[in-house]
Image (spheres, rainbow, N blue to C red):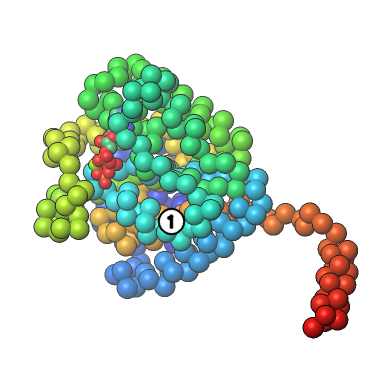
Amino acid sequence: VNYSKKFAVEPGSAVRLDDMDPSFTGKHASEDDAKAAVAKDRERLAELQYRLYAENQRSVLIVLQALDAGGKDGTVRHVFGALNPQGATAHSFKVPTAEEAAHDFLWRAHKVTPARGQIAIFNRSYYEDVLVTRVHGLVSKDAIEKRYDRIVEFEKNLAQAGTRILKFFLHISADEQLRRFEQRLDDPRRQWKISESDYSERPYWDAYRKAYEDTLERTSTNRAPWYVIPANHKWFRNLAVGRIVTDAVDELDPKYPPPAVDIEKMRAAFHAAAELSTGTA
Ligand code: ATP
Ligand code: MG
């Protein structure tokens, strides 16, 4: 199955999240059933990242957005745990600091976009500036509209500089969110994740959904597509995100650069060195 096609938000199309099943698992009946595919993608991604890094020309930006308990952290751990840290960065976007808030909203994001050869993962992103800000009325409707345009321009700018952008909305149901909050309460290893805002944001569920729908509609482009990932099942979420990212880097087809030296000359030097060292042995 081509998940990139299946879950992509077609540029200019209307998005209705209610029509998208967050429990979808495709042809896979269970986690076990998907294990081999996940392992294969992880290996492919690691190999492709190595080529991207060696090529040192292009970069990849991955944006993860979701409501609380949507699984951003788990996705970073499971899908991107396969990456070599030397060629990857991850950034969490929190409530802006005083310094960040004193700048335009893209400033803090632009500073951490991926350098050539790198893969950057944004856990939340500049999209918070058209989501949480809108839901809480911190920014006017008019300003939000302008920000959509600024975001599209920003991503165009990055794309033209050689950055492949992939944006994921991890789609869970309200019931699944509550189930995960309950697990957090009952599991000492997860209790640290609980925040007051988990519950104070829940009444805004519908407002968030609407804000996400508009955002996906206004900012999904061919050069920076959004994907709506069914995320009630964590294992399927990992499979789908991993596959889409791996296929996208595969499509970039990064190439090893030509050697910086004359290989024949180096081979001669090697033989000379080898002969000398057998002489001394
Ligand atoms: P988890 O989903 O695992 O709880 P998290 O990403 O929610 O992790 P937190 O530190 O709990 O991490 O929350 C970060 C908070 O910062 C979120 O509530 C988010 O909406 C908020 N935030 C991020 N960017 C902005 C912004 N530009 N303006 C206002 N709030 C923002
Ligand atoms: Mg939180």
Query: In screen coordinates, is 244 left or right of 47?
Result: left
Q: In which quarter of the image is the C terminus?
A: bottom right
- Relative to 25, say whether 120 is above or below: above
Taking the spot 30% from the left edge, 17% from the top edge, the residue there is 140
Residue plotted at (46% across, 26% down): 107
Residue appearing at x 86%, y 67% in the figure? 269
Q: How crowded is mark 1: few (under 14 residues within 10 Å), some or many (20 or more)?
A: many
| SS for callout 1 | helix
Q: Which residue is drawn at 32% across and 51% down?
A: 73
Could one spot residue 42 in this view of the protein? yes
Residue 263 location, x and y as percent?
83, 63
Between 212 and 264, which is closer to the camera in this rendering? 264
110 up-or-down from 144: above or below:
below
Nearer to me, 107 or 163: 107
Rendered location of residue 27, percent (x, y): 35, 67
Q: Position of residue 69 (x, y in %)?
A: 23, 48
Q: Quadrant of the N terminus?
A: bottom left
Q: What residue type is labelled 1?
A: Phe
Q: Circle 1 is placed at which residue position?
A: 80
Ligand 1, by image quadrant, is top left
